[in-house]
């Protein structure tokens, strides 16, 4: 791995890095953004000065999908990379590659559709692999597996345990007790020590005759600031079996307490790809796509909507709840305050596409 | 397509000649009988802007949300092989289960347990029609034909087609010599291979432009389509007729109608047309016979200003075409097709797909509605709705040719001049108004959307 990227952006980052450190002071905890751009760069970004601090080339030239989870100390970023087939751990302080696991074996190809989590003590990484056995004249789809890796297993990491996992699982996260939450047809909780799995929030299988089944595309796990595992959904309210109104809703797990909830948060008037709540007020929810939106989940209404310059996929929020970060899709991150006043824009050297926009603090 | 996939995705190296031989062998020995492909001729001919329907509650959502449902309807497999196809889909396209209309259901389970058995039942590997077709005598393409059709933007045309056998099995060369009905010449040549005894596939050059041709040679009068391989929308439905036939008959008229007071060329196609009196009714004057042979009559005619609308009593010798050629004073109704068209923005790597519209005129004679064929109209586009107006779709999405009804989409990619940096897509109202009768109009919808990235021959 190349330790430091020597692009113009990288050089600029190098030149400002000491300045940032001096200003911040050696002991002060700073907030950073972490994301990936095509084809293979992982970036550490200082949102305050709106500059890239460090760009790490991640081995493997093929982007995809750029799903990121952080170690509990936020110093290591784990990314799904290289055609969705590898998980790579990168030290954000020096770009060193500290972990790598390839999901496939022999003629079994494995891809992870954004299913990545780290244990609360940072010792384990969890991945759901969708697997297919590729024969000479036909394929055989295999049952997905939850693979457990030790984070100190190095660059040829093998799982220490695997368990059967449901199909169609995307985002995943771990709570304080180490239980895993998986977003599939329903929201499941899995014990990664035993593989025992239970449904904690029924979605496809909910018993709500007054609502249609929900639809959800959730591939951005961004609850590290708010300590929540949140999946947005859309659903139609029904009367006599026919839709009368369309709604945004959330399925949510509190990652500190393990409490769950599922509720509508406002009318569906536009598309939202990812949502994040205010860390101080779980019913204040912000969403991003072609609009930046603010939902009041308690009142079940839209508070504010702002048209963005273009489409963005991935939203996150600062630890103080004052600043909203919007990235993904194209090649710039925009920054807003909670009244949607624009605070800045950070140009990226490539498209972020489906990458997660994470908020780190160290 | 399976062979192409083996090459593109799995690195199988097959020389082009061997590939052709393999495809030919498989088509000839494991192909589809004419009855089995009959329902999907439009797909094979790459006709666009069709709405499919199937006798299954979820087949469209499960399968035909990504590609045509017809694609699977052109396959025959045993149940185990249909199951392999399901496994292939999930294994090859691993995000497929997560897409809209898949992530809200157990796609893999439904595909295996509901769709595969239904396909195995309705499209089983063995069929009586295939057994019968293998015993049947096939039509020989070699010989002299005449062909006609309508070339969008150019007009109606006819041509003599001479087909001769090539060196390889079922390979042919052909030459075309003809004209548009306005008198401009049409020349071309090409090479063809016939698969499965009736599936004619040709590369043609017509007036210097390259085309593909698909014909169904299981019919006495083969029909099919000539189209631009880089822009499927630009194509023409064609009919071929043997030049020699036992009985005299009138088969087609180009154009299909004549307007009162106008003078132009009229082309009659059929057999045994080289002898006998030509009569088009008392109100159509024959100024000159431009060309006359057994299979074609080209004439310079003029229609009386006081023409009584109705079918013209077209007579050549003993042959009569009672409902072949309509005479009209005015167009009473116009019908634009397609009702919903989809065009695609493009660039060099993914060429644009045009919007190609046509307008058929009708005139009312008493209780009878006479089709006039394509009539001269002026074309324009307008915003389909308020959103399209606000987004200035008419300005950004492309250009409609007022004379031909061909819409040329704009270039692909984000457009910095648009809100949200949006692509130059659009939702347009396509309007046609009859020339000289602007009050007679019809309209349809044109969605101008983004490129398709995966463009196999059968979509």
Image (cartoon, helix red, strand yellow):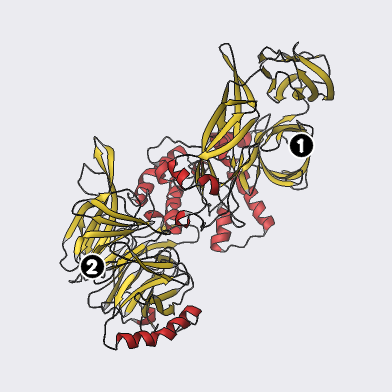
Q: Nearer the viewer, residue A3 or B195?
A: A3
* Disc 1 element: loop
Residue drawn at 31 percent across, 80 percent down: A75
Q: Residue at x 38, y 75 (%)?
A: A50
- Where is residue A194 shown, x and y percent of the image? 21, 68
Mark 2 lies on a secondary structure that is loop
Kindly tell me whether residue B443 is visible in this rendering: yes
Labels 1 and 2 touching (C-beta < 8 A)? no
Horizontal placement of B84 versus B351: left or right? left
Mark 1 is surrounded, within 10 Å at the Cα level, by few (under 14), some (14 to 19) or many (20 or more) other residues, namely: some
Residue A362 drawn above or below residue A283: below
Which quadrant does the C terminus of chain A fall into? bottom left
Q: Residue A289's spot in the image, x, y percent?
A: 37, 57
Task: Report the quarter where the N terminus of chain A lies.
Answer: bottom left
Marks 1 and 2 share the same chain? no
Q: What x and y, as percent, mark residue B163?
A: 77, 38
Q: In the rendered view, would you say A157 is above or below B238? A: below
- Find residue A226 and name its label: 2
Question: Does residue A172 appear to the left or right of B426 in the view shown?
Answer: left
For disc 2, the chain is: A
Q: Specify whether residue A86 is in view.
A: no
Mark 2 packing: few (<14 Cα in 10 Å), some, or many (20+)? many
Q: On residue A232, which mark appears?
A: none
Q: Quadrant of residue A273?
A: bottom left
**Residue A239 location (% of width, % of height):** 24, 36
Give the answer, above or below, for where A196 lies relative to B293: below
Number of the front mark, 1 or 2 = 2
From the image, tell me which residue sits under label 1.
B142
Q: Gap in Å between the C-alphas at discs 1 and 2?
A: 76 Å
- Residue drawn at 63 percent across, 60 percent down: B14
């Amino acid at each position: 791995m190349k330790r430091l990227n020597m692009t113009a952006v990288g050089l600029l980052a190098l030149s400002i890095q000491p300045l940032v450190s001096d200003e911040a002071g050696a002991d002060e905890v700073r907030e950073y953004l972490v994301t990936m751009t095509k084809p293979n760069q992982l970036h550490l970004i200082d949102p305050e000065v709106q500059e890239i601090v460090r760009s790490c080339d991640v081995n493997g030239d093929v982007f995809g999908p750029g799903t990121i989870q952080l170690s509990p100390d936020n110093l290591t970023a784990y990314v799904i990379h290289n055609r969705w087939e590898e998980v790579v751990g990168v030290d954000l302080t020096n770009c060193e590659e500290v972990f790598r696991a390839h999901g496939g074996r022999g003629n079994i190809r494995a891809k992870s559709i954004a299913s990545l989590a780290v244990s609360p003590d940072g010792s384990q990484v969890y991945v759901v692999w969708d697997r297919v056995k590729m024969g000479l004249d036909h394929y055989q789809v295999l049952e997905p597996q939850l693979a457990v890796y030790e984070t100190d297993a190095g660059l040829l990491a093998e799982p220490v345990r695997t368990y059967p996992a449901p199909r169609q699982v995307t985002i995943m996260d771990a709570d304080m007790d180490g239980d895993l939450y998986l977003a599939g047809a329903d929201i499941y909780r899995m014990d990664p020590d035993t593989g025992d799995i239970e449904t904690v929030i029924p979605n496809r299988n909910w018993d709500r005759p007054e609502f249609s089944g929900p639809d959800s595309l959730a591939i951005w796990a961004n609850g590290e600031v708010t300590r929540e595992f949140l999946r947005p959904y859309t659903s139609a309210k029904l009367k006599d079996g026919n839709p009368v109104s369309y709604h945004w809703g959330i399925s949510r797990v509190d990652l500190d307490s393990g409490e769950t909830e599922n509720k509508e948060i406002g009318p569906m008037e536009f598309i939202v790809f990812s949502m994040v709540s205010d860390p101080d007020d779980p019913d204040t929810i912000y969403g991003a796509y072609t609009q930046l939106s603010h939902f009041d989940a308690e009142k079940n209404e839209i508070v504010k909507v702002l048209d963005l310059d273009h489409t963005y996929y991935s939203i996150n929020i600062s630890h103080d709840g004052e600043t909203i970060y919007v990235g993904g899709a194209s090649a710039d991150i925009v920054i807003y305050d909670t009244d949607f006043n624009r605070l800045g824009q950070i140009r990226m050297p490539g498209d972020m596409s489906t990458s997660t926009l994470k908020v780190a603090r160290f | 397509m399976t062979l192409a996939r083996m090459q593109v995705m799995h690195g199988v190296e097959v020389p082009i000649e061997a590939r052709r031989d393999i495809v030919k062998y498989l088509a000839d020995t494991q192909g589809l009988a004419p009855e089995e492909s009959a329902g999907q001729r439009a797909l094979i001919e790459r006709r666009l802007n069709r709405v499919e329907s199937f006798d299954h509650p979820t087949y469209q959502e499960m399968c035909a949300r990504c590609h045509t449902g017809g694609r699977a309807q052109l396959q025959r497999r045993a149940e185990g092989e249909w199951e392999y196809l399901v496994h292939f889909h999930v294994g090859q396209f691993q995000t497929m289960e997560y897409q809209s209309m898949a992530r809200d259901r157990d796609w893999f389970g439904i595909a295996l347990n509901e769709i595969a058995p239904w396909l195995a039942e309705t499209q089983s590997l063995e069929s009586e029609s295939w057994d019968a077709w293998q015993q049947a005598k096939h039509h020989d393409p070699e010989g002299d034909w005449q062909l006609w059709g309508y070339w969008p933007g150019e007009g109606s045309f006819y041509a003599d087609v001479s087909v001769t056998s090539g060196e390889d099995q079922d390979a042919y060369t052909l030459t075309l010599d003809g004209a548009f009905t306005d008198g401009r010449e049409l020349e071309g040549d090409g090479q063809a291979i016939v698969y499965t005894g009736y599936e004619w596939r040709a590369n043609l050059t017509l007036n210097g432009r390259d085309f593909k041709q698909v014909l169904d040679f299981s019919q006495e009068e083969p029909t099919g389509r000539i189209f631009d391989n880089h822009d499927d929308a630009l194509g023409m439905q064609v009919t071929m007729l043997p030049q020699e036939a036992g009985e005299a008959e009138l088969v087609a008229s180009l154009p299909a109608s004549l307007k009162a007071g106008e003078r132009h060329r009229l082309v009659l196609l059929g057999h045994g047309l080289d002898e006998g009196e030509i009569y088009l009714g008392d109100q159509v004057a024959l100024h000159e016979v431009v060309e006359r042979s057994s299979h074609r009559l080209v004439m310079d005619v003029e229609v009386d200003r006081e023409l009584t609308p109705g079918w013209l009593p077209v007579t050549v010798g003993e042959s009569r075409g009672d409902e072949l050629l309509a005479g009209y004073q005015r167009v009473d109704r116009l019908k634009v097709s397609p009702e919903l068209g989809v065009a695609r923005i493009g660039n060099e790597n993914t060429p644009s797909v045009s919007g190609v519209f046509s307008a058929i005129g009708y005139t009312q004679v008493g209780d009878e509605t006479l089709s006039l064929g394509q009539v001269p109209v002026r074309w324009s586009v307008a915003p389909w709705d308020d959103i399209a107006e606000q987004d200035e779709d008419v300005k950004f999405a492309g250009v409609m040719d007022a004379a031909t009804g061909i819409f040329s989409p704009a270039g692909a990619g984000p457009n910095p001049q648009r809100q949200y940096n949006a692509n130059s897509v659009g939702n347009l109202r396509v309007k046609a108004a009859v020339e000289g009768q602007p009050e007679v109009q019809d309209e349809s919808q044109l969605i101008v959307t983004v490129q398709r990235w995966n463009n196999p021959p059968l979509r």
